[in-house]
Image (spheres, grey):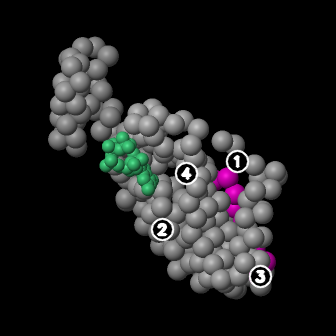
Amino acid sequence: MKSMEEAVRQILLGIGEDPERQGLKNTPFRVAKMFREVTKGYQADPQKIINNAIFDVDYDEMVVVANIEYYSLCEHHLLPFFGVVHVGYIPRGKVVGLSKIPRIVDMFARRLQIQEKMTLEIAHLLNDALDPDGVGVVVEGQHMCMMMRGVQKDKAKMITSAMLGSFKDDEKTRAEFLSLIRSPRVEAPY
Ligand SMILES: Nc1nc2c(ncn2[C@@H]2O[C@H](COP(=O)(O)OP(=O)(O)OP(=O)(O)O)[C@@H](O)[C@H]2O)c(=O)[nH]1
Ligand SMILES: [Zn+2]
């Protein structure tokens, strides 16, 4: 903790600032606290998040939760990337409590990430926990490291997907999922 604060102090010195001036005096403390907050997904236990909320149900049609907003940090630049996640699955006897899906998204988003890995991690956790007929995850992301620096393309959006089971093997299932998340009724807020 103290070493994180010292590291932030060094960054302030590195950019030519005066870490002792009034506005910056508490900044090393604030930044260390902020980093712990936005990376608290490392401490989360996936079993604890979902174990108590798996329910036996006969429902065997597609379940879709669209437009789950997330904020993550790219592991290359420690700058935010953010957007929405769409999750779909076809249960095989077991469903998960609705709120647990955004909690799973947050658990993986609040780490240093690349979007592809986060997409896969969400899909595999649901697949392992529910043993469903299939899982689909689509992630839309805008990356600050590409918007405010580097190539500076602020309209470019990255779209990644992970399709498992019937979402991978069955074209109709995949098409149904993609059409549900593209429906104007679930238009992304971004
Ligand atoms: N595939 C992928 N790449 C990412 C993600 N977040 C950031 N990147 C990219 O990671 C790459 C790192 O490339 P480097 O050449 O090592 O770093 P850089 O010199 O800062 O690259 P520029 O951004 O092109 O200036 C960049 O192309 C970023 O756009 C992500 O979630 N997925
Ligand atoms: Zn980056």
Residue at which label 2 appears? 121
Based on the displayed image, in which of its 4 quarters is residue 34 positioned? top left
Name the element at disc 4: strand
Q: Distance of mark 1 from mark 3, alpha carbons?
A: 26 Å
Q: Name the mark nearer the viewer: 1 or 3.
A: 1
Q: Residue at x 71, y 82 (%)?
A: 170
Q: Amino acid at mark 2?
A: Glu
Q: Name the mark nearer the viewer: 4 or 2.
A: 4
Name the element at disc 2: helix
Q: Distance of mark 1 from mark 4, alpha carbons?
A: 14 Å
Q: Which mark is residue 188?
A: 1
Q: Amino acid at mark 4?
A: Met
Name the element at disc 3: loop
Q: Earlier in the sequence, mark 2 or mark 1?
A: 2
Q: Depth check: give the residue in front, 88 or 53.
A: 88
The local crowd at label 2, few if under 14, some if 14 to 19, many if 20 or more residues have their Cα within 10 Å, is some
- Residue 93 is situated, as x and y percent measured from the top left of the image, at 70, 85
Q: Name the mark nearer the viewer: 1 or 4.
A: 4
Q: Distance of mark 4 from mark 2, alpha carbons?
A: 17 Å
Contact, mark 1 vs mark 4 (Cβ under 8 Å): no
Q: Name the mark nearer the viewer: 2 or 3.
A: 2
Residue at which label 3 appears? 60
Contact, mark 3 vs mark 4 (Cβ under 8 Å): no
In this rendering, the count of numbered labels is 4
- Residue 14 is situated, as x and y percent measured from the top left of the image, at 19, 27
Magenta stretch: includes residue 63: yes
State which image quarter holds ligand 2.
Answer: top left
Q: Which residues are magenta?
A: 60-68
Residue at which label 4 appears? 158
